[in-house]
Structure formats: C-alpha cells, structure tokens
Image (tube, rainbow, N blue to C red):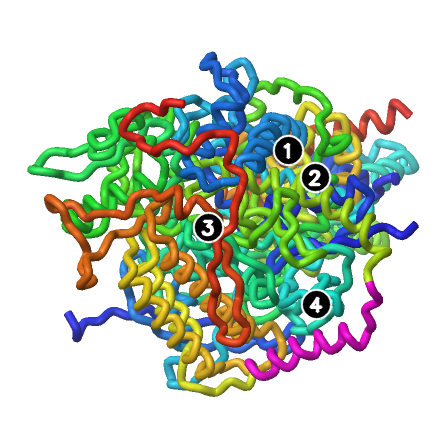
Amino acid sequence: MAKNKIIVVGGGLSGLMATLKICEAGGEVDLFSYCPVKRSHSLCAQGGINACMDTKGEHDSIYEHFDDTVYGGDFLADQLAVKGMVEAAPKLIKMFDRMGVPFTRTPEGVLDLRNFGGQKNKRTCFAGSTTGQQLLYALDEQVRRWEVKGGVTKYEFWEFVKIFKDKNGVCRGIIAQSMNSMEIKAFKADVVILATGGPGQVFGRCTASTICNGSAVSAVYQQGAKIANPEFIQIHPTAIPGSDKNRLMSEACRGEGGRVWVYRDGKPWYFLEDMYPAYGNLVPRDVASRAIFKVCVHMDLGINHDRRVYLDLSHIPADYLERKLGGIIEIYTEFVGKDPRKVPMEIFPSVHYSMGGIYVDRKHFTNIPGLMASGECDHQYHGANRLGANSLLSAAYSGTVSGPEAVKWAKENVSKLCEITDAEIEAARKEVQDEYDKIRQMNGPENAHKLHQEMGEIMYEYVSIERDNNGLDICLGKLKEILKRWENIGVTDHGNWANQEAMFVRQLRNMIIYAMAITKSARSRDESRGAHAKIMLDENGKRIEKDGELQFYPRNDEKFMFTSVVSFDAATEEPVVTYEEFEHSLIKARPRNYAVAKKE
Amino acid sequence: MINVSFYLRRLHSLCGLVLLGGVLIEHLLTNASAMGGPEVFNNGLAMMEQIPQPIFLGIEICLYAVPILFHGIYGVYIAMQAKNNPSEYGYSRNWKFALQRWTAWYLVAFLIWHVGYLRIYTKGIMGEHISYALVQSTLANPVVFALYAIGMFAAIFHFCNGITTFCMTWGITKGPRSQCVVDKGAMGLCVLMCLFTLAFMSSYFM
Amino acid sequence: MAEQKKTVKFIIERQDSPTSKPYTQEFEIPYRPALNVVASLMEIQKNPVTTDGKKVAPVVWECNCLEKVCGACMMVINGRARQACCALIDELEQPIRLQPARTFPVIRDLLIDRSVMFESLKRVQAWVEVDGSWEVKDAPIQNPYTATTAYEISHCMTCGCCLEACPNVGPQSDFIGASPSVQAYLFNLHPLGKFDKEKRLEALMGKGGITSCGNSQNCVEVCPKNIKLTTYLAQLNRDVNKHALKNIFNK
C-alpha cells in the first residue's frame, strides 16, 4: 500500500514534531519552509518549557499547571485541550532529554527547574537561556535522521502560497514557490498541516523573526479557513526597543530574581512588587506590560521621560547569572553595548506572541477538510493570554496531536475523496502564477517596505496594550486605506531570480488582511480579558477617567466567554466576527487578580 | 572503508616530524662542525664515507629520499587545498598556517636545486667529494648564500611549526593553554636553530 | 544638528545570479545610534538608490531572528565572516564593505547556499538514535559538567563563519569544516548518543573529514558563539587516532 503523503508547512518546533510523528506512524512528509528548518523562529524562545516534573519538593501537580494555564489565559482556553497538553508535558520533556537537549541540570544530574511568570511553583525546564534553540535542534536532528531514512523530503527556501481544493472543498495540496528559481509548483497531499508560526510582523517591530509574518495563515483565511481569537496579542513586558526589531529579554530574568523599577521622587520604585504583592515581578505578561505602560505613558515616570523602565539583575551574583542567563546577557551586551551584570537594563513592552490563530478543534483540524493547523498559527491552548514557557510546550504538544491525527484522517478518508484532475490543479497554479507575474510588473509610487512600516506603527498605536473603540475604528479605516495603497506599490526588481521584493509584496497584502481581522475582532469584544484591555468611552467618545485612573471594561463572562471566530468575506475583503462556545466546564471561571495569591 | 586519506595524512605528519626532523637535525649537526674549521668538517665527512657504499645508499634512499618525496608530493597536494587568508584573518596561528605552506613551496624548489646540484650533479655525476672548500666556494656567492640561508630558515620554521601542529593533530595538546605553551616553545626553538644556522654558515668567512 | 547629519556608507558586492559576474554598488543611508548591518540593509530596501542616484533592485540577503541565534545573516563584513545582525555600525570602519561568503555558492548578492553544511551533519550522524518519540523510560541522569560542555557546543547555529574563515574549506577542498566535525563530538558526549560514537569517528576519518584540518585556528577566532572549536577538534583528533589504533590492532 502506498504511504500517505502529508505536507507540513513550516519547520519550527510544531512542524518538526508533527513530521516526526507522521514518519513514525508510517506516513511520508513533504516539509516546506522558507528558511532552512534549523533557522525557524522557535529558536528565539529563551526561558524554558513548562512541565510538572515536581523535583523541587514543592508538591507541584499537573492540576496546578492546568489551573495556572487556564487562569493565566483568563478562562478563554479550551480546558480539555489544555488538560491534554499539561498531562503530556512531563513525557515530552523526557523525550527531549533522550534526544539530547542539553537541559540545565542540578548538581546531581537531574533537570533543574526555574520560576516563571504566573506560576507559584518551579515548573520550567530550561537549557540555559536558549531553550527554544536547543529543543528545535533536537527535533531538527531527528527529522534529518528521517530524511536520511527516506520518510521526509525537505523543500527549504520554498514559500507556501496557497492551498488548492477539490470540487467538494477538501484541501488536496498546496501551491508553493521556490524562493531562488521563482518556479511555482503544485504539490498534492492527503493532508496539509500548517505550522507556520505567528503574525508578529503585522506589527512591524516585534520580538519575532522577520519570517513571522502570518502570511500563510492569512492566505488560508482568505480561502475560507476561520480564524479564532486574533485580538489576543501578547505584549511581552521586557524587550530591548530597537529600530529593526525589539529584542526579547526573557521572562527568566524576572524568574531568576530580576526586579523592575523606575525612579519616583528620586528613589527607585519597584512598582510591580508594590502593585502586586503576591506575585511581585512574576505577574503574567499582560499584567506586567500594562503596568509598565501605565508607569511610562500615564504617570510619565519612564527613564528620561522615555518609554523605558529598568530591569535590574545587577544585585545577582555574576557567576550565577552567567550560568542561568548567559545567552540573554550576551544579547544585551552585544546589541546595547552595556553589561547587565553591572547596570540595570532598559526595557519596554513589545508585541511578542499571538494567542489566536487558525480556528481548530482539539485534534487540530480546521473547518476546511484536509487542512490542519498546529503551533502558534493555531488558536488553541492559551486563551486570552499565554503563560511564559507554555509556548514551547504548546508548539511541541500540538505537533504530537496534529501529526498522528493527520495520518489517521488520511487513512480513513483518502479513498472516499473525489478525483481531482491535473487541469484543476494547473488552474490553481496558474492563478498564483498570474498573481505573481502581476506583482512583478507593479509600477506605482509606493514602497512596500515603507508601507509595512506604516502599518506596524498604526497597529502599535491602536491595537496594542491599551485599546478603545474609537482607536479601533480609526485603525480599521486606515488599514483599508493601506490595502488600497498596496495596489500602488512599485517594485524595482522585475527579475525572476531570487526576487525577495516581489515575494514581500505578496506577503504584505496578506499581512494587511490579517491586521484587519485582528482589529475587527478587537473592536467587537467589549470587555477586558487577558491581553485584550479596552478602555471605556463616554458618549462623546472620550476615555473615561476616575480619580486619574483610566476605566477599563471589566471581564464579561456572560457575553464574551466565547471564542471569537473570524471569517473572510471575499466580496468586501472584510472580516466577519461571530462567537462560538468552547469547553470550560472543568474549572469554574473566577476573577483573575494577581495582587493576591491564587485561590482555587 | 579503509580511509586512505586519513592514514596518508597521519603518515605525512609522522614522517615530517620524525624522519625529516631527523634529517634536518643531522644536517645542522654535520654542518655545524664547520665551525671547528676545515679539518673537523672534512674528518666528519670522511667518517661518513667509511660506511659501505650499498648501506649508505640504502640509508639515503630509505631515510632521506623516500620520506622527502612522500612528504613533498603529498604536501603539495595538501597545500593546494588551502586558500591562504592571513590578510583577512591576521591571527598568529593563521599566519603560521600560511607560512607553513609558503615555506613548503620554497622548500620544494630549494630541495630540487640543493639535492640536484650537490648530491646528484656534483657528487653523483661529477664524482667530486663534498668538502669544506667546496661548500665555502659555493657559499661565497652572496646570492647562493642568501638562498641557502632562506632555505634553512624555511626548513627550520616548517619543522618547528610542525611540532605545534603535530601536537594538535595527534590530540596531545588539547586546550588553548597547552597549545600556546608548545607553540611558544617551538618558536623559541626555531629562533635558536636559525641563529645556530647563521653562525655556522658565517663561520666559513670568519 | 541638521547640517551635520551623519551618514553611513556601504560598498556592497552584488551578483545577479550564481553564474554572473560580481560587481559593486555604493549606498549611503542616514546614521542613527545602535544601527547594525541588517537594519542598514532594511533601510536600503526602503529606498534602493545608489550614491550616484541610480534606482536599483534592493540587495538580496538572508536574515531571520536578528538576535544572533538563527545563523542566517552570515556575510563577509569588512573582510571578516560574521553575523550581520550584531555587526554594529559604530564598531565598523567606513565605508563598510559587504560581500557574500564565497566559500559557499552564491545565489544572489549576499544570499548564499549553505546546504553543504546540513549534508555534512547527515554524514557525521549528528543525532541521537532514539527508538522513537514515544515514551520509553526516564532519560539517563547526566553529569552536569559534561552537560555544560554539551550546551556550549549545542549553541552552534550552522552559520558557516568557521567554514568561511577556514583556509582549508572551499571549492578547492573537500573539508567539511569545524562546525559539523564538532557536532559529532556533541553527540559522542550524550549518554545515549555515545553508543554510536565509533560510527561518527569513522565518518570523520573519511575523505574531507577531520584529517583535512590544517590547524589555522581561524574557526575559534570567528565563532560568533565562542565555541571552543579547536579544543574539541583536538579531542576529536585524539579520539580518532585511538579509534584508528583499535582498527589496526583489534580487527
């Protein structure tokens, strides 16, 4: 019997994990990535991966991990999905350990654990401060092994452009383009798994790699796949602001004892410890980001009245820092030129992660049969806010679900699918080819990269830490304008060899359309939950203030404890938001308050 | 797999250090006797000629000709695999890496001349005996003197730097400190041997 | 301030296709603090006009993370192989010369094809032969000191700096270079990876393996991750020699 052919798009942690599982289940994988998979963005994850190992005498339990994740996600995560993930976590760690991930160890040689935001117990396994890199490499090596054995064919430097469907609307393969020869080709498959990561580049400067543009997600969204919870964009509280990108300073800094402060009345004010005595510097990311934003923007206490605060490690012994945080200290020294062992670092929040993504069920199927999504590009596991060190876990875990499920689906369904003719496939290919040829001939006055920068600035202005309905309306209008201006882009490179400019122009359009989905979805959710914090407006459209404090919408479980589901209206190119039920019966929703210790 | 290139390369290293190192030291000691004057030098040569002809030839072929040819020919193959780049990466080890190859090229030409003229033409074909006077008259030409001096320096450097790389290649020195100590020692030896060479070469004209 | 607006000058070596001839173009961009080479190239993308006013195709190069962990943006900057993202303009002599790393085939401009490095990783079997990704049993306890060494080597991001700087790697030679060789050592350290140590040593003894190392030691000088490559190469030499003796006498 012929092996089932699965296409995996994206070679990060999730894509590689899925690939591995598919090979082990007897399937065959065509792995697409627009960089060598070893350079995927997963390697930027620094702090660690959560799993209840309970080796620190704290009586940590899987239930505690489960509850922290659900509570941290402000009760918007599907609880059955989360339960599956936290239960599998310790097994995944052991697997990675066997594969050779150089986890940091205790003197007796077992895995060390560290503290992380939003958790009271030590639960985060780590490899220095480059955990993502180490995990990704382990999977990369195992996939390379399968490549030698013959289960995997890699298509590196191939960009996914679109899926193609048969007449029943089942996804039957993808159209991809070589980034060097620019050849556009159709690839057939029994199942397609997208593991294409987050959409950080929609915000221009962020902590994500330049490759994390969400273009693939947007492409399938325009082809009918639904998106869920895109308004939940995690803003990481501690990043080094930069003009090319904001570089992440891991939460591990705070986990290992780093303190956040600014000067107030000439004296250091440790405002996180002051505002949230129970968790102190280890409050979850959304809480910390809003606090820093408030201190800088509303109280004007930032360093030199700039949007920056101190993250201080200088009180921690240098050799301890070297051992636990070596990698990120190096990043700061390298890119800023100052030594965090001696002076406090200057940081500010930055767009970091998208909790939302393609709408999937617990098995990672999308609403398009034959199309699955896995990793950051799906919407599962994190609800309204992700806990630090849960992303590596969800990425790896989702691959262990999507991979085997893909093979299972293929085995059960392939024989029932209708015939798809070469002419149909060629028509789909031709469409992409025509679109690309048209882009190559674009001759307007706009520069794609400048337009991208502009879009990022708009998104930061209106759809980041604090949102209000006025701003979101303005933002939607501006995005529509940008989409129109996209038509007037001029490319300087009309050639047909490694034409990065043309590819970027195509991605940019997808990014704009995804940005609209984020904004529309944020506009529709009139509450504050997790990373989505919305300020109330009075009837004149002015922000409501009480005692000098901005008034946020409270969480509204009755109206909004639902998944926002966004579908694309092809006629107007606009997003349509609806709400869907999800599973939240295991842990009853309760108010989320990090000023006091969590009560269950 | 029998890994021919691995064994050849290791043999090249061993042959260079032990056999050709021996040849170099033998030459240094023999020629150093010139410092004692013509009698000492000529007596030394005469002693050597007491070795029966077939044995002497055997030694020349096994300990001189074959190792030199092997080390030289395989060495040319190795040197061709390098694109020297000390101008971009001017670290001392990289300079020595390049010098190792440049001295090698010089030594190939030098040895063809030296062996071809002295051993094959003068001694072999013309049947002349090598003597203090012969060497003295040869070196009297300043160009020849310079070429010989450079040839000796090249051989000495090539040998001494070879000690350092030998220790790395055979895994004797592993860490940077031990490698550095051996390197410094070898370079010290190199300077001493060069001075020593200069001394006996000049002694002909003192 | 306006009249003394500082600029940064670049001389970029370009090449339109793998077979076409290289040429250079000059660009000038406005200076700002903490600017690095990748950010400068992005600036050129936004306005791809040379100093003599010619509108040209934007420079093609590869970059991902901009944090010096992905290894993508390696190029030759002022004659030295390094990551472009952490090459700060303030620390570079101007005009800044950018060239592709020609040890590898050039695809276009500064974009190169490093697939040979990934092929070398296959050759040295740089992986642990686990039975599968399923649960087996607890992973073995590891000596924390050995694990620290493994962690250091495991930082290698396959950027290719060590290959570009090595005089013995290039089209003229078949040497696989420091990075893949030392990866073999990484897996020889692992308590399970150790089981296949001899296979990896055997691979390193093959043509273009560790034997081709000429000890120029440029690799350790240019490694952006400060991996003690020469130390591990020497250790590998030791291991390979022992293995060779075993081969000779035990068979």
Q: Mark 2 belongs to which subunit?
A: C
Amino acid residing under circle 3: Ser
Q: What secondary structure is found at the residue carrying circle 3?
A: strand
Up-down relation of residue C122 to residue A542 (above or below): above
In the picture of the structure, the residue carrying the numbered disc 1 is C186
Q: Which residues are magenta?
A: A418-439
Provide residue B134's location: percent of width, then percent of height.
70, 49
Is residue A307 within the magenta segment?
A: no
Provide residue A448's location: percent of width, then percent of height.
44, 75
In the picture of the structure, the residue carrying the numbered disc 3 is A354
Q: CA distance from mark 2 to mark 3?
A: 33 Å
Q: Mark 3 belongs to which subunit?
A: A
Query: Decide: marks 3, 4 in contact (CB < 8 A)?
Result: no
Instruction: Pick whichever, A297 or C158, lies toward us.
Output: A297
Q: Mark 1 belongs to which subunit?
A: C
Q: What secondary structure is found at the residue carrying circle 4?
A: strand
Q: Mark 4 belongs to which subunit?
A: A
Can residue C81 be seen in the rendering of this structure? Answer: no
- How packed mark 1 is, by other alpha carbons closer than 10 Å (few <14, some 14-19, many 20 or more), is many
- How packed mark 4 is, by other alpha carbons closer than 10 Å (few <14, some 14-19, many 20 or more), is many
In the picture of the structure, the residue carrying the numbered disc 2 is C126
Query: Decide: marks 1, 2 in contact (CB < 8 A)?
Result: yes
- Give the mark nearer the N terminus: 1 vs 2: 2
Q: CA distance from mark 4 to mark 2?
A: 37 Å
